[in-house]
Amino acid sequence: MYNNTISLGEKHNSLNFTPSIIVLKGITHPFTTRTTMASSSTNHGLPRIGFPSSSTVTSNYGIEPLTGTNFTSWKDNVKLTLGVMDLDLALRYDPPEPLTAESTHEQKRFHEIWERSNRMSLMIIKNSISVAIRGAIPDSDNAKTYMDSVEEQFKGTSKAHASTLILKMLTTKYNGTSGVREHIMMMSDMANKLKGMDMEISEGFLVHFIMTSLPTQFGPFKINYNTQREKWKMSELIAMCVQEEERLKVEKPDVAHVTTTSSSFKRKGKSQVGESSKVPKASTSATPGSKGALKQLRCKFCHKKAHYQRDCSKFKEWLAKKGIPYNPTTAPKPKDN
């Protein structure tokens, strides 16, 4: 039997790792169903390992093909798949030094392991990219370099996604449709996504920012937080907010969520105010100033309709011409000349 633990030299920081691509003789590889025993001519009598094809890997592990709008999720899925299969060595370590006649046995084995990891990683990465996008990416025989080239192509997309996340964080308020725990976790998830785009948000700022997204029912709770000297961690914020929400529910047991009560009360109040502020319309036929009454009026001076004699402009001019002061109640009737 062979020891499957490889000690790296000083150039590799003396790290110990156990790659699954080198196994004990006769033990089936965890990611394949075939183990062919090697003959005496193979390297140190190690078994030949049958690796799955890249298409099988991408289908079995659910790597969604890179289409241009899903770069962030695609990158996470690729790293997860390669990590689970223990094939991400080429992404985590730089290429080893070229082998020489003075190379040790450990250096030769690490070189072989890295080459295998690099080759398999390239196959999986390229196979998970759509053909249209793959042609625009500079080719490379180094998996890490190729991955960096893919990321370079989608920097603009990442910036747009970051802008969308920032805008969403600024406009998201807790509306009571879900629990306050879910609201805080959603805000924290958006902050973690920004962190992956080199836009890290400190925990203290995030806690204060989430506090501002809570509704007015949490007003005393927020005042209490602002008066404290110590800053809360995210775990403390979640625990305190959940406790406060439960307290508010106990005070109003007939309400499922606090903010739902507030919104329904506002809607009900507005409707009541609107109904009470409505003034009943006066009957148009009962008032002399209404349109129906105006049609029945006729001036006794000019004999025109729709106004009284006291409001007639020609009647007022006639009074002024005669030198008679205008008095609407005792205005004299004009005499025929």
Image (cartoon, rainbow, N blue to C red):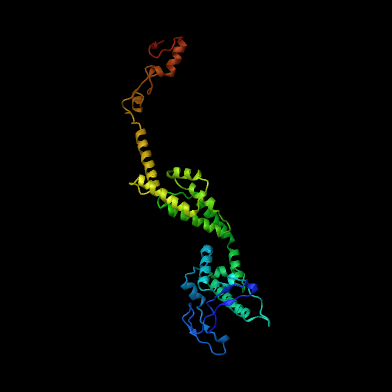
Residue 262 position, x and y percent, is 39, 43
Q: Residue furthest bottom?
A: 40
Residue beneath the point at 46% across and 73% down: 60
For this rendering, which residue is in front, 62 or 332? 62
Quadrant for the C terminus in the image = top left
Residue 39 position, x and y percent, is 54, 89
For this rendering, which residue is in front, 46 or 330? 46
Residue 46 position, x and y percent, is 54, 84
Q: Residue furthest front?
A: 229
Q: Judge from the rendering whether residue 12 lies leftward or rightward of residue 78; answer left or right.
A: right
Above or below, 189 relative to 285: below
Residue 15 position, x and y percent, is 59, 72
Q: How many marks?
A: 0
Above or below, 48 relative to 219: below
Residue beneath the point at 49% across and 57% down: 189
Residue beneath the point at 42% across and 44% down: 217
Above or below, 105 relative to 330: below
